[in-house]
Amino acid sequence: MATPTELDDYLFDLRGYLVLEQALEPDLVDKLNTALDNFPELEPQAWAGNVHRVDDNPGNAGVELQNIVEGGPEFERLIDHPSWLAHVRRYCGEQDSYVEGLFIDECFATIRQDGGFFPVHSGGYRGAVRGQYRYKDGVFRCGQVNILMALTDIGPGDGGTLVIPGSHKSNMNHPQFEQYKSWDTTMDTMPGVVEMHLKKGDALLFCDGLSHGASTRTNPGERRALIYRYGPSWATTRWGYSYSDELLARVTPQQRAILQPVAPRRPGPQ
Ligand SMILES: O=C(O)CCC(=O)C(=O)O
């Protein structure tokens, strides 16, 4: 299992993100791509089992398959993947507290074609506790840490994630935030942004409190990524998705503890 180094901690604190190079094994990338190739074609708002297609701002962000962890065994391997498990435990897993543990509160596939983009959102300034960055008394207490896995190479023109390094701790609003936050515009020319270029199999780890979005895809073809959002054990899903009993029964105890850290307690024998 990869463990966070002193340099990881330093760069995560400084910039709000880390690039985990070749986090996914090549055979796993192939399996994930094949699973997406073979995934039933869904109309917006349609379900395939417990996976739901809901496109953010239809037409702009591309196809989004929510609850993708229910899409097959390849997606289950990502729950506690050794390339980032120790990192997310450290950064948002309430380590050394009475509620230590993780929860995945959103996981989805995002498939974006020519013209797709995502406007800026988040940031330290007046940020929600849910996505907050916090380091105090020698421990991290972030509200949410995202793992964005590249299933295709993401280079210039491919619609890479845009971040404003350090904005997770910003005390001031970006003077042009309001202008760039709407779906009527892109954040391609927003001052201060850095585009994340990833190789297929790399993962971008970032605190959700970092100002971020994605540039406009101008190349043909598609950008494929998976986003798993980790938070503390007591968190709850943002959109109300729940993990099926079948999935919870099938996964390992460690994976189950991440999908359902607190099992429902009802009257009767415990
Ligand atoms: O699609 C991207 O690259 C950005 C993803 C994003 O905005 C998010 O995770 O909230």
Image (cartoon, helix red, strand yellow):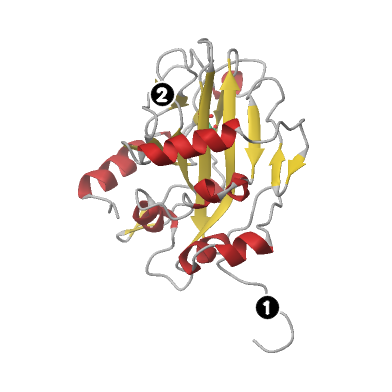
Say what secondary structure mark 1 lies in.
loop
**Label 1 or label 2, whichever comes before in sequence order:** 2
- Quarter of the image with the C terminus in it: bottom right
**What residue is shown with label 1?**
265
Say what secondary structure mark 2 lies in.
loop
The 10 Å Cα crowd at callout 1, few under 14, some 14 to 19, many 20 or more, is few
Q: Nearer the viewer, residue 240 or 25?
A: 25
Q: Above or below — where is 239 with respect to 41?
A: below
Q: Residue 103 at x, y = what percent?
A: 53, 58
Q: Is residue 55 visible?
A: yes
Query: Which residue shows up at 75% across the image and 42% down it?
Result: 47
Residue 153 is labelled as: 2
Would you say 41 lies left or right of 213 here? right
Badge 1 amino acid? Arg
Query: What distance separates the C-alpha of mark 1 from that of mark 2?
Result: 45 Å
- Quarter of the image with the N terminus in it: bottom left
Would you say 32 lies left or right of 50 here? left
Residue 219 is labelled as: none
Answer with the quarter of the image where residue 43 lies.
top right
Answer with the quarter of the image where residue 92 lies.
bottom left
Query: Which residue shows up at 74% across the image and 33% down it?
Result: 42
Badge 2 amino acid? Asp
